[in-house]
Image (tube, helix red, strand yellow):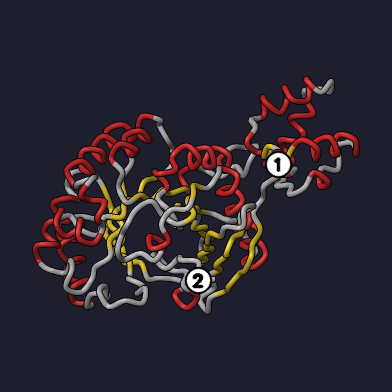
Amino acid sequence: MADKKKDIRALSKEQLREFFVKEGDKAFRGNQVYEWLWGKGAHTFEDMTNISKETRQMLQDNFVINHISVDTMQRSSDGTVKNAVKLHDGLIVESVLIPTETRTTACVSSQVGCSLDCKFCATSRLKRMRNLNPDEIYDQVVAIDKESKLYFNRPLSNIVFMGMGEPLMNYNNVMKAIDKITSPEGLGMSPKRIVVSTSGVPKMIKKMADDAVKFNLAVSLHSAIDEVRTEIMPFNATFPLEDLKEALEYWYEKTQRKITYEYVVWDGINDRREDINALVKFCKYVPCKINIIEYNPIDDGQFQQASSSAIDNYIQALESNNIVVNVRRSRGKDIDAACGQLANKS
């Protein structure tokens, strides 16, 4: 029965070597298979052409490769590509390729659905069905790297964990995936080109700092006033801003790396002067920069993009306090590929 077989990519290289020795073969055979699985992205044992037919059959009898497949792909008028990615159990997640003049960024998912309950995000309405395995996260990156080479004639340059799910609620699998993505035996990408974006899970932010991770951290903040943040992101009642602040101070003390705050301004929700002042104050705790993100409506009236004058007020206040601020225009809106829109409409 296929479902009795173990996913071979759940094994470390050492475990693969041990498996071959136990089967009376040479340990280096494990290295060869490992390279096919991670370096060359083999989807079947038949792809492993420098391994004998008998050995491939033996692998087939014992293991499966639970690779993803791109179920549907949409291309936006601005060049953005959205993949609906089918997992081995038939569930679907979405990942996005975002091209600019100088880079191509993969926006990848870490969960099917999401553990959190942010009211402005389409993904949160799906609820969490399961965590993605490290190989399922890795495969999304491999697929987007191929599309980047195909459509833009250059390899993937950056990765953001801003797709479906809360990465820090799938901590171990996300870290294992990043290890594979940055390993010379995997994709060999620099961790400096990876951003993990969290809604703010203080305990796990501290754990990342203790684990001495080398990638960058972004926090979806959206308000620096507890009552407002809890209204739009109800889990903030469990992880209040004081705890988040303390975790971010710990992160900076340990890593010396600046934090990026992702921030959407909504009409009548966080566009008042007191909201601006609270953000300026929050930005002084640790070195940071702000990305003000254009909002992408998800079919309801509660959340509407704030006026351009409200956004200008934010920019002026931040810049006059020497805080770096960028306004991020949304990409891929016409195919529901923009921030907060990933909801498996397919």
Comes first in the chain, label 1 or label 2: 1
Q: Amino acid at mark 2?
A: Lys
The image quarter in which residue 87 lies? bottom right
Q: Residue at x 44, y 75 (%)?
A: 333
Q: Residue at x 19, y 47 (%)?
A: 241
Circle nearer the viewer, 1 or 2: 2
Q: Measuring from the top left, give residue 263's x and y in whole percent.
A: 27, 61
58 relative to 206 in the view: left or right: right
The image quarter in which residue 324 lies? bottom left
Q: Is residue 165 above or below residue 94?
A: above
Q: Residue at x 35, y 49 (%)?
A: 198
Q: Is residue 59 above or below residue 302?
A: above
List the single residue furthest toward the front.
1
Q: Is residue 63 above or below residue 13?
A: below
List the single residue furthest toward the left.
274
Closer to us: 217 or 163: 163
Q: Residue at x 58, y 47 (%)?
A: 138
Q: Measuring from the top left, give residue 51's x and y in whole percent.
A: 86, 37
Query: Where's the N terminus, which quadrant?
Result: top right
The image quarter in which residue 122 lies? bottom left
Q: Measuring from the top left, give residue 124's x and y in whole percent.
A: 38, 60
30 relative to 127 in the view: left or right: right
Q: Please tell me whether mark 1 sits on a helix, a strand or a loop.
A: helix
Q: Please tell me whether mark 2 sits on a helix, a strand or a loop.
A: loop
Mark on residue 37? 1
User: Label 2 belongs to which residue?
Assistant: 345
Q: Amino acid at mark 1?
A: Leu
Q: Residues within 10 Å of mark 1 (few under 14, many from 20)?
A: many
Q: Measuring from the top left, give residue 108's x and y in whole percent.
A: 50, 55
Closer to us: 232 or 128: 128
